[in-house]
């Protein structure tokens, strides 16, 4: 459905440009947009490869296990319906850790794996469980200690100090994550009272 919406918007935009006589501007924007996309992608690849390497070193050094152990009680509180030592916990903790380091692209596959594991526990496969909703809320708000993607984009656009964004991002994601947890808990309690 989304593909049809996007295709419709693009076709309407191009048709409008032809009727307004600004087809040349559309053509220029298409090529400049493609060029900008490639530039940003290469910039993100470099920073993503760097942080993936850091994560691999941290994994080999046992830092991720320590982090998972540290976040374990929080995860068990957030997901009380998941049985202890279920594989979903490992993926959820990896997802949370990757998000903490601002590696949204690296966190996505782990989030998908966690959802697949949670689906195995779902008694109604066509309806999301409270644990799935919690994971989605946390993944979307995701508290970030180091916003690596934003730093990479700012570096690509020659920011004087690309890391200036760290403090405000930390505050904004902290508030977003707290809000997501409070709203999630409110809905869960409302559901349990039914």
Image (cartoon, helix red, strand yellow):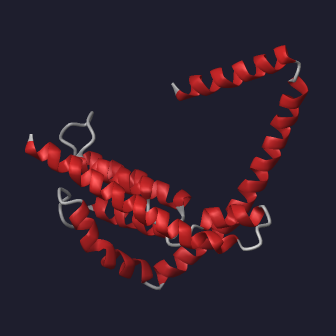
Q: Residue at x 22, y 44 (%)?
A: 122
Q: Is residue 30 above or below residue 121?
A: above
Percent across and percent down for residue 174 are 42, 66
Question: Given the current orientation, which residue lies at the most extreme left position?
Answer: 193
Percent across and percent down for residue 55 are 53, 74
Q: Is residue 79 above or below residue 9?
A: below
Q: Is residue 40 above or below residue 23?
A: below
Left or right of residue 84, residue 182 in this image? right
> In this view of the protein, which residue sits in the foreground, 96 or 183?
183
The quadrant of the picture occupied by the C terminus is top left
Left or right of residue 52, residue 139 in this image? left
Left or right of residue 101, residue 136 in this image? left
Q: Residue at x 84, y 42 (%)?
A: 32
Q: Is residue 138 above or below residue 46?
A: above
Residue 52 visible here: no
Q: Residue at x 28, y 45 (%)?
A: 119
Percent across and percent down for residue 181 are 30, 58
Percent across and percent down for residue 91 are 37, 62
Q: Residue at x 87, y 30 (%)?
A: 25
């Amino acid at each position: 459905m989304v593909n049809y919406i996007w295709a419709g918007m693009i076709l309407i935009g191009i048709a409008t440009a032809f009727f307004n006589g600004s087809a040349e501007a559309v053509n220029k924007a298409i090529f400049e947009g493609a060029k900008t996309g490639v530039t940003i992608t290469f910039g993100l690849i470099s920073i993503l490869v760097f942080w993936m390497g850091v994560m691999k070193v941290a994994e080999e050094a046992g830092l991720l296990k320590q982090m998972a152990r540290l976040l374990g009680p929080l995860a068990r509180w957030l997901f009380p319906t998941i049985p202890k030592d279920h594989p979903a916990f490992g993926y959820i903790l990896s997802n949370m850790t990757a998000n903490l380091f601002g590696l949204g692209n690296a966190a996505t596959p782990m989030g998908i794996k966690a959802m697949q594991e949670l689906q195995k526990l779902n008694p109604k496969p066509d309806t999301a469980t409270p644990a799935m909703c919690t994971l989605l809320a946390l993944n979307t708000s995701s508290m970030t200690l180091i916003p690596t993607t934003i730093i990479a984009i700012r570096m690509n656009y020659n920011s004087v100090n690309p890391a200036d964004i760290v403090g405000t991002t930390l505050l904004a994601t902290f508030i977003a994550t707290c809000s997501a947890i409070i709203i999630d808990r409110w809905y869960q309690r409302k559901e349990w009272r039914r």
